[in-house]
Amino acid sequence: MTTMMNLFKRKPDPAGGNAPLPDTPADLFIHSRWLQVFDRFRGLLIQLGVNYPQFRLILGYKLYMDAVDPNFMTTLTNGRRRAGKNAFLRGLWIYALVSLLLTAVIVAMPGNPVLILGSALLYYSTMYMTVLVQAFSGSLLDVRDVAILDTRGVGERTRSAAQTAHILVYVLSLFAALMAIPIVGSFYSLGVLGGILFLVSALVLLVVNYVLSIGIYAVILRFFHGERLKNILSMIQIAILIISVALPQVVNIITQLSSRGAVAAVVKASGFHWYMAIVYPFWFAGPNGWLASGQANPGGILTGLMLAAFILSLFAYGPAMRRLTTNLSKLNEESIEPAHTGWFFRLVRRLVPQSRDQRTFFTLSWRMMQANADYKMRVYPQLASGLVIMIPLALIPFGLADGTHRNFWAALQGSWTWSFLQIYAIAELPVAVYFLRFSQHPEAMKIFATLPRFDKSVLYREAIRTVYLRLAVPLILVLGLITLIFLPPLHVLSNTILALGVGLLMTLLNGTFMSGTAPYSQVFQTGQVNTGATWAASLLDFIIALVTGLLGAFVPWWAVLIVGTVILAGGWVVLGRSFKDANFILPGEADFN
């Protein structure tokens, strides 16, 4: 583990100075520690049929391209990076700091290894899934080099090995940053045997996570084609990010359901629970649980699930990787069918005024948002985070119940926090409005700069309206149907109308905060998201959500319905006349003038 962590240290200058290494490919081939690691397995790779000189050359250039790509994983450094230095590898110290907290928990609470170690492995899996979408997917689904390498006589086995090694560089780096210190801490708190078991279990989880990601993409590539394939891949990536937000909350929810106000009931050693079978990282804490209790419940059950997952991964990896490599060419297929808008679009489009081409620009904005995969992957998980955070709060009345026989459903139905669910789920709208400025093809907006006396307010207004009707309204309505299970129908109706009105109010305020930039006019830059306007709008939205949530929870439903109707109707009228002073610069406008 120490050797792996040394991969993150900067190699000292041969002359004794601290100057950074040169940023040319030739110097990377000489100084890269990762290439030196793979050099030690040269004989094994050759025996497996890999042309090692070609393998090393391909892998080296892939790492070099990662280092010089200005958009590769810049979230870890907030957009500030040194030229030619890999932003992902340079940002791993952030994960290492977080792992210190995991280590402190492992050392302080060794009595329940299943819960404590399982939570650490759950956090690792969550971060793996998040980074999978941001970095690994770009390599897994990269088809740009296939045609080039095929014409240079590079065999499929060599190309596949280089692609796998490229991904393993980041998989192993992330593993070392997140798990090296907790594993060392487990040797201290659980003993030598416990530490060894945790190390082995963590490595097995690494393999299972990697094969699982390969398998998901292989299945999708096998059954879908063309534009539908790209849409499905975007949906899978969005789902992975949402799951990575929701998965850590499972432990909080189960804690609420299983406790009665005493922390000891949570941290004490316990038997097998159904959620441990659903949240698969807990399987890999089974060996340590078995060692600590000496009983097959829960350790033996979880260990059996872990071994089954590992064996299945070993058998599934080869076929999955072959199918993935074979079907990657499908990503180059172009569909001639236009994107379908659906009945909901046709319904809400009727609500848009027909004057001044507003429906035309609303349709344009809807379709651009529909086709922008980057927008979906960065906004949808943020919206989901507000929803996921609220669910454990709704279970508080049940979790803090006294020793009396209180029915589970009665406790849920008696929770006033359900009134907050719809409003807090849309409290992340500032992110949705902020990302309107980005597009995969911002040069397309230049056409509007050539139009004489073009009304920019209509373009911006309909983009803001699209955020409300495409994102906020469906989420509010779906959550309204869910809360029907727990709240009276009239209460749900009033809360829904209030949430629709407040959501429109939030959208208008956020649009006002960020009206200085043209929609769909910039290439996405990861490090630009944390602007002052975004933070100010988010703070304001959460304050509004708190006030209106209390209104919906404790004020009679008929009064809430009246207030919500007034806000909704007034907000819709204001939206139709808003942003008349929009004065942003369109792409190409300065050149045209």
Image (cartoon, rainbow, N blue to C red):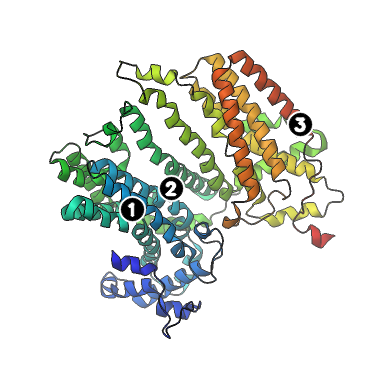
Closer to the chain start, of discs 1 and 3, is: 1
Q: Are marks 1 and 3 in contact (CB under 8 Å)?
A: no
Most extreme residue toward the left, as rendered?
A: 294
Disc number at residue 211? 1
As rendered, which of 348 and 240 lies closer to the eye? 240
Query: For the point 54% across and 54% down, which residue is it?
Result: 333
Q: Secondary structure at mark 2?
A: helix
Please state the horizontal and vertical placement of residue 88, each as a whole percent of the image.
46, 62
Q: Is residue 62 above or below residue 334?
A: below
Q: CA distance from mark 1 to mark 2?
A: 14 Å
Residue 374: x and y in percent read 57, 50
Front-lying residue, 581 or 334: 581
Q: Which residue is mark 2?
A: 220
Residue tagged 3: 574
Is the residue marked by circle 3 packed among few (<14), some (14-19), or many (20+) residues within 10 Å?
some
Sequence order check, earlier mark of 1 and 2? 1
Q: Is residue 456 visible?
A: yes
Residue found farthest to the bottom: 15
Q: Residue 574: horizontal and vertical position, in percent?
A: 76, 31
The residues tagged by marks 2 and 3 sit, at their Cα atoms, a distance apart of 45 Å
Disc 2 residue type (three-letter)? Ile
